C-alpha cells in the first residue's frame, strides 16, 4: 500500500507530546523518539532512543543536556568528509561511538540541481536509501537489539534524511502507524529551517534539498512496498529485525 498522505492529514505535532523536541544549545533537531502509540495498545518508551542533527556545534550547555539524558551510544551516518569538516563533540556519558557512513555519492549533483529538479533528486536519494543502504540500517538494528547500547542517539548532518529514514524504520518496527511516522518525519522541515535559511536565500536551488516533504519519504516506502512486500517483510528479511524483540525492548 502506498504511503500517499496529504500534508493536511498528518498530525505534525502530536498532541500527547510524543517525539518531543529537546532544546540543546548548538543543535536544532534533537528529539526523543518515545511516546508514540505502538502495536498492541502499547507506547514507545521515552528516554531510550534519540534522533538528531550532528553534534559538532554543541556548547558546554548543550553537552550537559545530552549528558543528563545519559546517552551511551552515538551512531553517526555522516560520510568521511562531513565528519572531517564538522567533528562531533561527545558528551561524557557516551562510551561507544559507531560510524555507519551513508554516502549516496552523486545522487544530488550540484551541476544538475535546479529548483525544478531538486525534488526528484531527493526522491532518488530516498530510493537509494531503501535499496542500497540496507547493510547500514541492518547494523543500526543490530545495535538497537542490544539494550545495553541504550540510551542511543543516531544522527547525520541535518537529522532529516538518513536519520529521518532510520527513525521511520525504527518506529515502524514497533508498530507505530505510518501516518504517525510521517508526521514525526515532517517535523524536521521547521526544525532545520533556520539552519539552512541563509544558504537557501543565497542559492534557491537548495530549497528542495534543505527540507523534507511527504513525497520524499513516500518514495522510499513505495520501493519497500513494491519491491519488498511492505515494511514488515522488509524489516525482517532485509534488515534482520526481530519485531517481537524490538517491541519488548522499546514499548511498554
Image (cartoon, helix red, strand yellow):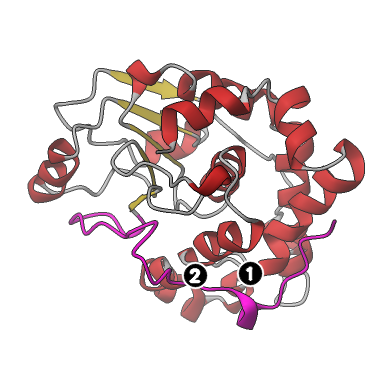
Query: Quick check: 131 above or below 17?
Result: above
Q: Is residue 55 left or right of residue 176?
A: left
Q: What is the tally of numbered marks visible in this picture? A: 2
Return the mark for residue 189.
2
Q: Is residue 132 left or right of residue 161?
A: right
Magenta span of residues: 1-29
Rendered residue at 52%/34% (across/down): 79
Disc 2 from disc 1: Cα separation: 8 Å
* Residue 8 belongs to magenta span: yes
* Residue 25, position as x, y percentages in the image: 18, 56
Query: Quick check: 91 above or below 209?
Result: above
**What is the quadrant of the C terminus in the image?**
top left
The part of the image, by quadrant, that contains residue 119 is bottom right
* Residue 238, position as x, y percentages in the image: 76, 25
Return the mark for residue 213.
1
Mark 1 closeness class: few <14, some 14–19, many ≥20 residues within 10 Å: some
Q: What main secondary structure does the magenta stretch of the protein show?
A: loop
* Residue 225 belongs to magenta span: no
* Residue 173, position as x, y percentages in the image: 60, 37
Q: Residue furthest right?
A: 226
Rendered residue at 51%/45% (across/down): 163
Query: Quick check: 240 above or below 154?
Result: above
Q: Residue furthest front?
A: 41
Rendered residue at 49%/20% (across/down): 145
* Residue 51, position as x, y percentages in the image: 40, 45
Q: Earlier in the sequence, mark 2 or mark 1?
A: 2
Q: Is residue 228 left or right of residue 36?
A: right
Q: Looking at the image, can residue 104 be seen?
A: yes
Return the mark for residue 240.
none
Circle 2: element type: helix
Amino acid at each position: 500500500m502506498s504511503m500517499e498522505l496529504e500534508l493536511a492529514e498528518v498530525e505534525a505535532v502530536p498532541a500527547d507530546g510524543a517525539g518531543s523536541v529537546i532544546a540543546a544549545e548548538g543543535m536544532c533537531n534533537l528529539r526523543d523518539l518515545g511516546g508514540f502509540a505502538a502495536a498492541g495498545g502499547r507506547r514507545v518508551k521515552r528516554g531510550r532512543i534519540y534522533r538528531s542533527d550532528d553534534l559538532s556545534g554543541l556548547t558546554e550547555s548543550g553537552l550537559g543536556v545530552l549528558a543528563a539524558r545519559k546517552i551511551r551510544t552515538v551512531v553517526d551516518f555522516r560520510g568521511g568528509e562531513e565528519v572531517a569538516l564538522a567533528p562531533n563533540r561527545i558528551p561524557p556519558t557516551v562510551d561507544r561511538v559507531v560510524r555507519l557512513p551513508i554516502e549516496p555519492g552523486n545522487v544530488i549533483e550540484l551541476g544538475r540541481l535546479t529548483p525544478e529538479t531538486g525534488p526528484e533528486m531527493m526522491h532518488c536519494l530516498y530510493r537509494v536509501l531503501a535499496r542500497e543502504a540496507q547493510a547500514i540500517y541492518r547494523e543500526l538494528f543490530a545495535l538497537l537489539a542490544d539494550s545495553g547500547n541504550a540510551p542511543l542517539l543516531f544522527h547525520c548532518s541535518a537529522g532529516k534524511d538518513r536519520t529521518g529514514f532510520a527513525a521511520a524504520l525504527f518506529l515502524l518496527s514497533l508498530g507505530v502507524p505510518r501516518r504517525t511516522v510521517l508526521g514525526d518525519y515532517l517535523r524536521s522541515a521547521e526544525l532545520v529551517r533556520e539552519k539552512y535559511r541563509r544558504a537557501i536565500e543565497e542559492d534557491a536551488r537548495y530549497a528542495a534539498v534543505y527540507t523534507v516533504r511527504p513525497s520524499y519519504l513516500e518514495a522510499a516506502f513505495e520501493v519497500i512496498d513494491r519491491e519488498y512486500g511492505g515494511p514488515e517483510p522488509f524489516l525482517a528479511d532485509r534488515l534482520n529485525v526481530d519485531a517481537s524483540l524490538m517491541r519488548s525492548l522499546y514499548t511498554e
